[in-house]
Image (spheres, rainbow, N blue to C red):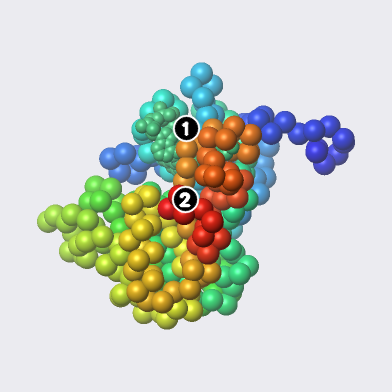
């Protein structure tokens, strides 16, 4: 319902936003900073929005900025097709529609307070994780140790490199990065992100572990965490499924009885016991 009257709010009606900044991040991704035309946009790390471009359609895109940042909503978009291609063609000052914030399964911001945190990110998985990472870093004294593990395909697919360098230089974050394939430009770790798990300096068994990456990554990360006896209750997985409406109406994201758009996209691993198809 609308706050000021008894009229039902149209869940399909987007708010308008303006592109405040857009730039190429690497070979496939563009970064966008949006200014919402009517100002305030409240959200929780882990939520996403439906981005609409007139004449092209809508696509679900995760919010990459932290709610602690007030200078606009940040998105990272990989060009794969019609809508994402149209988003890539936007210029500063162009308008687009934003529907949301969507998703009820979000990062456990309160539950993580006082705990050690380990973020395990693969490729574009850094994009949603970054929202919670920066939230934690902006409220640093509320949280324990922070370790960030990031894997990318190769040097050209690295994301947020200046930010990763800044996290590396902080004395209160353990930042570990690896590339599947290295080259002359890379002097760091080589191999998949799971190889970094045993390098984490904090006690994994008692930490909260936040995981986001391509579907193939989850199985191997969960095996590595099981080797370290991490309880399933302490693991949170950000799952992506094909979505259309984002509000539990179309069934596109359904896995058995669950709608990922409504119950997720962030799930506690132990809650997925009845949904083995999810991973
Ligand atoms: C909750 C959620 C958050 C997301 N966050 C981001 C994000 O932050 N940045 C980003 O770049 N992308 C994100 N995606 C994926 C993004 O929504 C799709 O890439 C986009 O909808 C593709 O639309 P399109 O019209 O450009 O491509 P289409 O023309 O519809 O499809 C082009 C190709 O992309 C594939 N594709 C379409 N949708 C998806 C999907 N959901 N997952 C995987 N492959 C897909 C199609 O099968 C096809 O091969 C997210 C998806 C979900 C569900
Ligand atoms: S995307 Fe329509 S039900 Fe989830």
Which residue is labeled 2 in the image? 278
Q: Which mark is residue 141?
A: none
Q: Position of residue 46 (x, y in %)?
A: 54, 53
Q: CA distance from mark 2 to mark 1?
A: 38 Å
* Location of residue 111 by image quarter: bottom right
Front-most of residues 118 and 171: 118
Q: Earlier in the sequence, mark 2 or mark 1?
A: 1
Q: Position of residue 165 (x, y in %)?
A: 34, 63
- 52 is higher (above) or lower (below) than 43: above
Look at the image and tell me in which quarter the N terminus lies: top right
Q: Position of residue 169 (x, y in %)?
A: 36, 70
- 171 is higher (above) or lower (below) than 245: below
The answer to whether residue 228 is seen in the rendering is yes
| Secondary-structure class at tag 2 | helix
Q: Quadrant of ligand 2?
A: top right
* Location of residue 106 by image quarter: bottom right
* Location of residue 83 by image quarter: top left
- 73 is higher (above) or lower (below) than 225: above
Q: Which residue does the image show at 47% across and 58% down from the upper left? A: 237
Which residue is labeled 1 in the image? 92
User: Within 10 Å of the Cα at label 1, are there few (<14), some (14-19), or many (20+) other Cα atoms?
Assistant: some
| Secondary-structure class at tag 1 | loop
């Amino acid at each position: 319902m609308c706050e000021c009257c008894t009229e039902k709010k149209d869940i399909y009606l987007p708010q308008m936003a303006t592109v405040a900044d857009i730039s190429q991040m690497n070979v496939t991704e563009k970064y966008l900073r949006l200014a919402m035309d009517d100002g305030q946009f409240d959200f929780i790390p882990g939520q996403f929005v439906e981005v609409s471009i007139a004449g092209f359609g809508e696509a679900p895109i995760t919010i990459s900025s932290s709610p602690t940042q007030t200078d606009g909503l940040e998105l990272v978009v990989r060009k794969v097709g019609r809508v994402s291609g149209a988003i890539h063609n936007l210029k500063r000052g162009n308008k687009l529609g934003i529907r949301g914030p969507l998703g009820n399964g979000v990062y456990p911001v309160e539950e993580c307070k006082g705990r050690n945190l380990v973020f395990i990110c693969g490729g574009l998985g850094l994009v949603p994780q970054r929202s919670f990472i920066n939230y934690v870093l902006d409220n640093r004294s509320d949280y324990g140790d922070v370790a960030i593990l990031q894997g990318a395909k190769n040097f050209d697919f690295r994301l947020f490199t200046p930010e990763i360098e800044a996290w590396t230089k902080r004395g209160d974050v353990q930042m570990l990065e690896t590339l599947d394939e290295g080259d002359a430009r890379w002097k760091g770790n080589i191999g998949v992100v799971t190889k970094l798990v045993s390098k984490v300096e904090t006690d994994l068994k008692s930490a909260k572990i936040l995981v986001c990456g391509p579907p193939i990554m989850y199985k191997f990360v969960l095996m590595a965490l099981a080797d370290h006896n991490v309880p399933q209750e302490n693991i949170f997985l950000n799952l992506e499924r094909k979505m259309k409406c984002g509000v539990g109406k179309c069934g596109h994201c359904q896995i058995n009885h669950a709608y990922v758009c409504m119950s997720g996209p962030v799930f506690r691993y132990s809650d997925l016991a009845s949904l083995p198809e999810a991973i």
